Amino acid sequence: MRHLAFAAGLLGATAASAQTPELTVYTYDSFVSDWGPGPQVEAAFEETCGCDLKLVGVEDGAALLARVRLEGAHSGADVVLGLDTNLMAAAHKTGLFAPHGVSADFDLPVAWDDPVFLPYDWGWFAFVHDKGFDAPASLRSLADSDATILIRDPRSSTPGLGLLMWVRAAYGDEAGAIWEGLADNIVTVTKGWSEAYGLFMEGEADMVLSYTTSPAYHLIAEEDDSKTAAIFDEGHYMQVEVAAMMAATDQPELAGEFLRFMVSDRFQSIIPTTNWMYPAVTPAGGLPEGFETLARPGKSLLLAPEEAAALRDQALAEWRAALSR
Amino acid sequence: MARRAQPLGAGPGIGAAACLAALILGTLAAVAWRAEAGGGLTAADWAAVRFTALQAALSASLSVALAIPVARALARRRFAGRRALIALLGVPFILPVIVAVLGLLQVFGRAGWVSEALGLFGLPPVRIYGLHGVVLAHVFLNLPLATRLILQGWQEVPAERFRLAAQLGFGPWAMLRLIEVPMLRQVVPGALAVVFAICLTSFAVALTLGGGPRATTIELAIYQSFRFDFDLGRAALLSGLQIVLTTGAAVVALRLARGTGFGAGLDRPVQRWDGRGAPARAGDAAWIGGTALFLILPLAAIAASGLAGFAGLPPAVWRAAAVSLAVAGVSTGLLLLMALPMAGAVALGRYGLIEVAGLLGLAASPLVIGTGLFILLRPYTDPTALALPVTALVNAVMALPFALRILVPRASEVVERHGRLALSLGMGRGAFLRLVFLPRMRAQIGFAAGLAMALSMGDLGVIALFAGAETATLPLQVYRLMGAYRMEAAAGAALLLLALSVGSFWILDRGGRWHAEA
């Protein structure tokens, strides 16, 4: 009997959703988690849109793009949220995304005028350490020092790829030499962010690759001000996270509405303390208390998407060669 | 070959094996078929293949070599806490990878307990990262499984053989040559093949403990082809290579493992009279104590760091725990439905292909199975809606090789010992199954079900490929907590996962053998 009731419930649910339009947003897993922005974003958007917002979590940015490519033009997604500048060129080449037509007053350290990809948050990559640790002041002095670091594999992690681009953007063709210098500082390379951060918290290394905003979590959520991010002279590479509308969406108006909502105060004020990144448009109320204590780099580095895509394979080969010695 | 009357039917087992092979090879074909033109294998891929085979061979040999004396000691000693220790042997194997790695590093890492102890004597910290670290982690994860498989071999030697050996006054050498070595020759190749296959698909453990891109395994290369290069053809090619390596190892192992020699006994509990001298006792104690310490320390580390976060676990974690229990329950049911007929068919002499089909579940990359299923299901339905059933199915397939290693030896023995009598009594197949086969297999079914349940509970599996917001399983929730900086809560959730896995394993394993010694 129970499965009959279950089937009836399913039918009922389908009938109900036929009346309210449904908007499907593919995003990365940590966005939809109970501790990410997902639940609040969903509630806030559904208040005004008269629709059902369905968030689907797919591991991380790279997996997200792979999923959309796998589904192609018949993708179930209306909007994809969670790609970054390193993935943008490949995403653009698929031709699966449509221009957003949204304008916003971005608070990004770089100019932004991409017609297809709309940023929703950003951060600077940085090495996070305990305040008591005397951190080096540049990538080069880190390479020369005996400080220990934890990094991530660029093949399985988007921040891992970010570090590759950081070294490339700062040192160009000298990047290989910097990596050779860094090789003896690297305790290990992990698959994803969580493993590396977990190991850092257990004291396996002096510093871990993360974001300048990471100490804000410890400060705001745990009232622990012992963590800080090392500021490097060469400047810090940025991660800009973007969303885009699928060209083949059957809900173009709703998708456009979601993208406008995404750069509005309501969405943007959820970001800092759930995604622990800087909002792309600073909300009217400003940043949450505690963010003003964060270290800010003097210089921002970011390769243009095409440049990043063109350099990627070479940068990976350099990295592998230097670390495989 | 003339068809001989059989107490059981082989049809269902052959059917199950065929379904399994269709699932694995079908998903692989789906991925290959969906591929756009891509590159073949690069030099880096071949380096990954070499490293993978090397670390898997080392890990398997060392795990099994160490498991032999440990299993021997456990087989001939009875002591307080022996049951608990044997139950604990199931644990490392079923831990989610990330939890196992963090636990191991809390003991063996640069800031771990061992390094701290060394520091007291002014010694430098241990350098765990490298090939030796990979092997250490794999031994930690697989030594327990190898021990259980080999221990089972010892327990399946009929009690009459030990009695006879005692009456004839066998010394340790005669015992080794006439009973133990022939038994090991039967059991060890299978154990080697299973551990080799597990280590072959290792990814996060190998990368983290290996210390960098030197430790690139095939599974990581597959991941890279999917995600970094979106080269499905290369992913399928690499996954095919993984399958060839595993089946190759399996075929060699099965060749070596043929030939039984103990004949039937009267199913009496085993009693041992050998190994009573002081040196033998001291040796066994050292093996058991050493292994227990090696396995328990990292588990204790996990428990210790989890306690703080355990009390305040958010409701989402409990919800995920309920989801995981349900998925694991369904997965265990599916597993038994596949494994029992297959074990029966192998027992009837249809080994070869069925056993190889059984190992396929281990050989195939979860990423390829998941993606293949996704491609196959998408034209008909929304795969995300099927996230949990698909996860249960894939988990069952992944646990099948272990279940077969556990069930097959006993099933063969039951058919061999009781088959002829059942036939001469004119017992129908249903009656044989109900009255003879299943009751005799209870202990093995319990062990296999417990292992499957726990494995399914701990495995992140394909859920990460399909998961929506509501369908999170407990391992996924552990990752999500870590991804949200909540390391303490994540450790608490990991402890809950550990407790649930061990609990269900223990209940099923004991349920199967509540009436028996061991």
Image: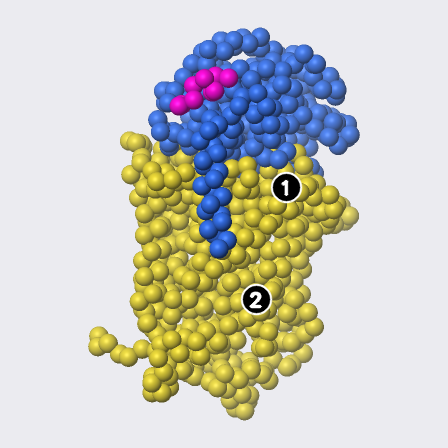
Residue at horizontal 47%, vertical 60%? B333
The answer to whether B222 appears left or right of B94 in the picture is: left
The verdict on a common chain for dots 1 and 2 is yes
Residue at 64% across, 81% down: B276
Q: Which residue is mark 2?
A: B509
Q: Which residues are magenta?
A: A249-257
Whether A124 is drawn above or below B394: the answer is above
Q: Is residue B136 above or below residue B165?
A: above
Q: Position of residue B45 (x, y in %)?
A: 39, 39
Residue ID at (56%, 82%): B269
Dominant SS of magenta comes to helix
Tag shown at residue B316: 1
Image hue for chain A: blue
At 26% from the left and 79% from the top, the residue drawn is B4
- Three-letter amino acid code of the residue under disc 1: Ala
Q: Is residue B214 visible?
A: no
Residue B80: x and y in percent read: 70, 72
Residue A282 point in image, percent of width and height = 64, 13
